[in-house]
Image (cartoon, rainbow, N blue to C red):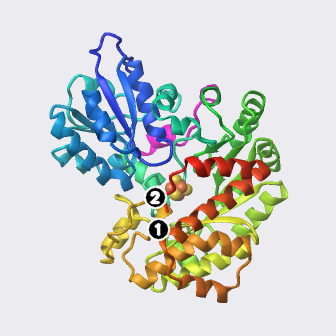
């Protein structure tokens, strides 16, 4: 590891955060910059006139780590800033940059980092430009996230009831639509480095220290574990009990985690019983029901029977379960496929909470290639944000409307056992935007209350006041 040097020149570095959620990647970037003695400031791109604030601060560098859906907005912002600070150096990293390093060809972008932040800052501060590839080391070798500065600069995040953390940076699966899929990352970094970095866990003391800092900095009622599969990793039977003991003793805040049917069925009774002490809800990726749709998503290893067994097993242990699915697939009859999926969710978890999202087409994924190979046009309306309900593929207006309605109403359909005949009618309704927003809000309410009970009702009222909902 290259150690930071405290004698480096001191620069002002702006880190721009897009979206309503905490930008986890930029927290680590900020932490690394602090180790290099740089002056950092986070800017909330959701705020009005934020570009003016950035310009007034006069940064030497401006760092972006936008998800694909925010990349165009980041470019617009950069162009505007450049008009006022022509010499500012722009740096892009994160998922989108790793999936599409060719963005370095854009004249506004000075540096693109492909790989973790560690190993890049020294080069950037010495004036290196272009594509910087950093090697994967090991997840213990990560900076402490700069939450003090993040919460100082973006207080709305500090007051959020739910915060994000993760223990494993990758996942073993290869979903066709995902830019974090194992094969995609192995192609970029190689098999061994992928296993060592993406499929190993961060040390428990580092995770606990991070959680303690979160609790010390603001009100937190729940921590969402953004690991894609809590049960992945060969050490789960030993790692998890040790982790749960420590978390229960030193943190105590309930967690929301995600998994798959396969690993939920594979782990021991002891793991599930132990996890229940700190987790109140588990999200299970169902994604689709038809075997051919699962195959299209590269999830042919899953099936409805296993999904049902996994759901029942979790419920037996007292977990709330959030079933997650994807609609708007490139099939002949996308609406029928979507209805099959929702009816499957009703069979798997009758009365359960579910979240149904439209498929988005991200750069560098197998799904993007599939669409290209099959001459499928992508929707100009899709921003990459699943919360809008708009599918990534350009279907007809009628199909788009039905799929969007289904995304907004699926939680209602599954939780309240709505019959298929009613579902079909609801899909045809033209909602005004105010109703669309109200539906998204209600879906959010159902999810929070399902996980946190009476406390969830109080929290939701607070959340509603400060929330900018994407719908
Ligand atoms: S499980 Fe999640 S992170 Fe892993 S490949 Fe599938 S969508 Fe991506």
Whether residue 417 is in magenta: the answer is no
Q: Circle 2 sits in a helix, a strand or a loop, which is it?
A: loop
Quarter assignment of residue 217: top right
Picture residue at 36% right of the left edge, 76% below the top: 394
Q: Quadrant for the N terminus, please.
A: top left
Where in the figure is residue 460, as x and y percent of width and height? Answer: 67, 51
Range shown magenta: 190-210
Where in the figure is residue 38, as x and y percent of width and height? Answer: 35, 20
Picture residue at 36% right of the left edge, 69% below the top: 381
Q: Is mark 2 within 8 Å of ligand 1?
A: yes
Mark linked to residue 359: 1
Quarter assignment of residue 114: top left
For residue 161, above or below residue 434: above
Where in the figure is residue 21, as x and y percent of width and height? Answer: 50, 46
Asked whether 339 or 400 is in front, the reply is: 400
Picture residue at 59% right of the left edge, 61% below the top: 441
- Does residue 250 appear in this view? yes
Q: Give the residue at mark 2.
A: 178
For residue 164, above or below residue 373: above
Q: Circle 1 sits in a helix, a strand or a loop, which is it?
A: loop
């Amino acid at each position: 590891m290259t150690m930071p040097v405290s004698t480096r020149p001191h620069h002002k570095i702006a880190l721009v955060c897009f979206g309503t959620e905490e930008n986890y990647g930029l927290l680590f970037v900020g932490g690394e910059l602090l180790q290099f003695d740089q002056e950092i400031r986070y800017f909330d791109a959701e705020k009005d006139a934020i570009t003016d604030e950035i310009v007034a601060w006069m940064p030497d560098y401006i760092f972006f780590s936008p998800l694909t859906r925010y990349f165009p907005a980041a470019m617009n912002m950069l162009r505007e800033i450049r008009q006022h600070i022509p010499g500012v150096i722009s740096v892009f990293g994160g998922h989108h940059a790793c999936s599409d390093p060719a963005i370095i060809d854009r004249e506004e972008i000075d540096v693109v980092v492909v790989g973790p932040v560690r190993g890049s800052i020294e080069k950037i501060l010495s004036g290196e430009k272009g594509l910087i590839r950093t090697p994967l080391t090991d997840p213990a070798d990560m900076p402490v996230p700069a939450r003090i500065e993040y919460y100082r600069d973006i207080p709305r995040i500090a007051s959020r009831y739910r915060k994000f953390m993760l223990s494993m940076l990758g996942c073993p699966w290869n979903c066709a639509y995902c830019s974090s899929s194992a094969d995609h990352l192995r192609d970029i970094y190689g098999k061994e480095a992928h296993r060592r970095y993406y499929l190993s866990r961060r040390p428990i003391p580092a995770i606990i220290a991070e959680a303690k800092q979160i609790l010390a900095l603001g009100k937190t009622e729940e921590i969402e574990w953004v690991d894609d599969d809590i049960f992945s990793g060969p050490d789960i039977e030993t790692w998890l009990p040790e982790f749960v003991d420590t978390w229960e003793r030193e943190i105590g805040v309930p967690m929301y985690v995600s998994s798959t049917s396969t690993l939920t069925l594979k782990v021991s009774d002891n793991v599930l019983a132990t996890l229940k002490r700190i987790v109140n809800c588990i999200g299970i990726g169902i994604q689709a029901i038809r075997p051919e749709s699962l195959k299209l998503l590269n999830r042919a290893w899953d099936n409805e029977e296993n999904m049902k067994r996994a759901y029942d097993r979790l419920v037996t242990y007292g977990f709330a379960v959030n079933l997650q699915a994807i609609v708007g697939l490139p099939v002949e009859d996308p609406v029928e496929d979507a209805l099959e999926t929702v009816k499957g969710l009703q069979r798997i978890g009758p009365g359960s909470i579910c979240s149904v999202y439209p498929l988005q087409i991200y750069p560098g994924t197998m799904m993007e290639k599939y669409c290209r190979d099959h001459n499928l046009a992508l929707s100009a309306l899709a921003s990459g944000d699943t919360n809008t309900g708009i599918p990534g593929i350009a279907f007809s207006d009628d199909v788009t409307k039905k799929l969007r309605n289904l995304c907004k109403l699926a939680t209602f359909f599954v939780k309240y056992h709505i019959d298929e005949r009613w579902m079909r009618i609801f899909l045809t309704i033209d909602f005004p935007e105010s109703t669309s927003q109200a539906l998204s809000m209600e879906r959010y309410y159902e999810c929070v209350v399902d996980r946190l009970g009476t406390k969830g009702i109080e929290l939701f009222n607070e959340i509603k006041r400060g929330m900018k909902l994407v719908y």
